[in-house]
Image (cartoon, grey):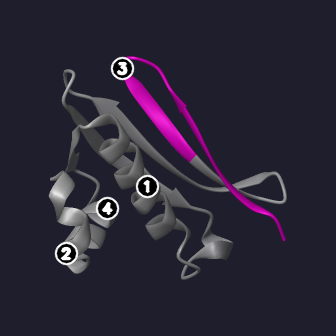
Amino acid sequence: MTEVIELEHNDQKGTLYLKVDNKTEAKLTFVFAGATKMIIDHTEVNPSNKGKGFGKKLVFEAVKFSREKGITILPLCPFAKSVFDKTPELRDVL
């Protein structure tokens, strides 16, 4: 099983995809709010993969991206917000 996270983005929005054996199994979408903030608006995991941590991996990847870019995150997506609430070490990007 090969698991890969891919990022696609432009100046306005982006999507992180978690692919297993080249098939998209989860995705996280975000929009940019100016030059210093990204808003996570949706996280989706295929129902057959619930509980495997795919959504959490995508949130962690979004945090990594925001740290690299020096921008903050506003987690409007309820799932993403719950990951931030449960993981204090991610809160530096809020």
Q: Residue furthest top?
A: 11
Name which residue lies at 84% across and 59% down: 21
Q: Nearer the viewer, mark 1 or mark 3?
A: 3
Q: Provide the secondary structure element on which disc 4 rests.
A: helix
Q: Name the amino acid type tagged 2.
A: Pro
Q: Is residue 90 magenta?
A: no
Alpha carbon distance from label 3 to label 2 = 28 Å
Alpha carbon distance from label 4 to label 3 = 19 Å
| Residue located beneath label 1 in the image | 43
Could you tell me residue 2's position as x and y percent? 81, 64
| Residue located beneath label 2 in the image | 88
User: Image check: 25 left or right of 10?
Assistant: right
The quarter holding residue 41 reads top left
The quarter holding residue 84 reads bottom left
The residue carrying pointer 2 sits among few (fewer than 14), some (14 to 19) or many (20 or more) residues within 10 Å by Cα, namely: few
Identify which residue, 67 or 87, lies in the foreground.
67
**Contact (CB < 8 A) between labels 1 and 4?**
yes
Could you tell me residue 4's position as x and y percent? 70, 56
**Contact (CB < 8 A) between labels 4 and 2?**
no
| Residue located beneath label 4 in the image | 80
Q: Name the amino acid type tagged 1.
A: Thr
User: Image check: 37 left or right of 2?
Assistant: left
Q: Is residue 12 magenta?
A: yes
